[in-house]
Image (cartoon, rainbow, N blue to C red):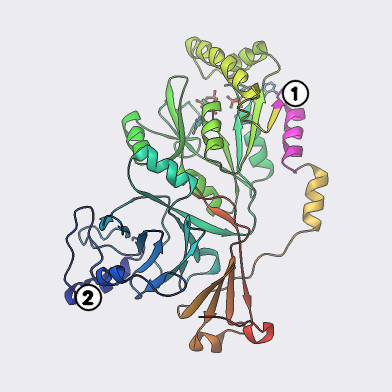
Amino acid sequence: MDLFSPLSSCFDQGESRIARLDISMGEAPAFFADDLQKGFPNGLDLKSNGCETSIVVGNRTYVIGGTSDKSTLSVGVQVYDRSSGEWINPTVLGTKPKPSKGHSAVLLNEDRILIINKGTTLDDCAWFLEVDTQYVRKQRKILGSEVVAWSKGVRGNAEKPIVISGPSGVGKGTLISMLMKEFPSMFGFSVSHTTRAPRAMEKDGVHYHFTERSVMEKEIKDGKFLEFAEVHGNLYGTSVEAVEVVADEGKRCILDIDVQGAKSVRDTKIEAIFIFIKPPSVEQLEKRLRARKTETDEQIEKRLKNAKGEMEQAEAQSPCIFDHILENDILDKCYASLKKLLGLDDESVIAASESKISAPEVIYLPTDYSESKIGDKVIIRCRNAELEKASKDLIVVDVSSIKGSAPGRTRGLNIYTMDSFLDGVDVIN
Ligand SMILES: Nc1nc2c(ncn2[C@@H]2O[C@H](COP(=O)(O)OP(=O)(O)O)[C@@H](O)[C@H]2O)c(=O)[nH]1
Ligand SMILES: Nc1ncnc2c1ncn2[C@@H]1O[C@H](COP(=O)(O)OP(=O)(O)O)[C@@H](O)[C@H]1O
């Protein structure tokens, strides 16, 4: 079921009351038409009738949570451009939030809107609709259309993703397997898409999503990929979903991608650790590739030829793609170095376990509340019925330390409860 689809019935009621607008680029949610012309007077630029929420960003109004398109009941993010007087149906990237009992919206920094979903757990209540972040601007250029992107807010400081690159046969897969075996609850592998044929032991959906070129090219066009590249004659790419699946499991994402892909990810300004694995020599690389027995002689030649270029690019100072270059000579030594730079050597693990912070408390966001934005904090004040149940009547969503953006999750969200009486908080509504 789509986001907010239960709310579309509210829309139908509105439709009978007010004449619908017919607009060339997209159809306006009918009961908003008059309001949009008048503007939104409250301090949050916020107006919600319980069915949809609209919010003004510059000369645009974003209407979130419903659609006038009854045939699809698809999620509504519609944009009203005040300067042209036109409605736009933007391309919506990223995974949308699940349907909830309503929502409200708060504008942050002109580039993203915080959407708070009512009645959900605090772990699922905060989503960001990005309207002008760097990623959105880039996708707008690539897709040649209006773009918005969803990114779920993740509480606490999940660790940065790890990008691992290196020539074919250098040992990337081996090192990643060792890491995931030793720390199964810590790391998750971003399963790439590829047009190459599966090897004997490879499983679809585990090692790769094996796909047809035409299908993948269409999905790339639709903006479903964080990055993609032609490598050794096949198409490879990381879907936005592949990265989000890992973040949703609360794990640190590992990407095994080529140097072009690493450069693309670097260009998106996603915060990640970029590691290049290099062989002790080209002769050793060839030996490993031949011993693996997964490629034909011709494919091995191609991979060795490409290895030279990859190593040159990785070691070039400008642009400097990688934060670390590790030589995989003796496997165990290289693995120990990898763990050390990820803070996973014995000393760091003991230190981390000693200073372990307790897990965040499980709280539900009420359905009846009012919210205010004070600096980097959104204060949610529970209304009467909820107050009787809750010992603490305020929920604070602190966005001061958020990191990252779409594609993928926005980390560093701090959500906690407070008692307004004990803490003497004066909440402005
Ligand atoms: N850009 C990009 N490269 C990828 C992706 N997945 C795998 N690769 C790279 O594609 C290359 C070939 O991978 P593969 O066919 O599995 O062969 P292998 O490296 O010899 O094991 C490697 O350099 C991988 O790092 C991806 O999603 N994006
Ligand atoms: N340090 C090493 N010394 C010798 N062989 C290695 C080493 N690291 C990996 N290998 C072997 O080399 C082959 C290629 O490794 P693999 O992990 O598949 O490389 P990649 O994923 O980079 O293509 C495998 O057969 C693996 O067992």
Residue 229 can be seen in this image: yes
Q: Identify which amino acid the numbered label 1 is placed on.
A: Ile
**Neighbourhood count class around disc 2 (C-alpha, 10 Å): few under 14, some 14–19, many 20 upward:** few
Q: Secondary structure under badge 2?
A: helix
**Quarter holding the N terminus?**
bottom left
The x and y percentages for residue 132 are: 45, 51
What residue lies at 47% left-to-right and 73% top-to-bottom?
43
Q: Is mark 1 within 8 Å of ligand 2?
A: yes
Q: Which is in the foreground here, disc 1 or disc 2?
A: 2
**Neighbourhood count class around disc 1 (C-alpha, 10 Å): few under 14, some 14–19, many 20 upward:** few
Examine the structure image and report whether residue 6 is included in the region drawn in magenta. no
Residue 46, image quadrant: bottom left
The x and y percentages for residue 98 are: 41, 62
Residue 228 to residue 152: above or below: above
The residue to which callout 1 is attached is 330
Q: Which mark is residue 218?
A: none
Q: CA distance from mark 1 to mark 2?
A: 69 Å
Residue 329, image quadrant: top right
Residue 224 can be seen in this image: no
What residue lies at 36% left-to-right and 61% top-to-bottom?
62
**Comes first in the chain, label 1 or label 2:** 2
* In front of the other: 268 or 289: 268
The x and y percentages for residue 373 are: 54, 71
The residue to which callout 2 is attached is 13
* In front of the other: 52 or 102: 52
The x and y percentages for residue 238 are: 47, 37
Which range is magenta? 326-344
Q: Identify which amino acid the numbered label 2 is placed on.
A: Gln
Q: Secondary structure under badge 1?
A: loop
Residue 139 to residue 251: above or below: above
* In front of the other: 222 or 137: 137
* In front of the other: 46 or 297: 46
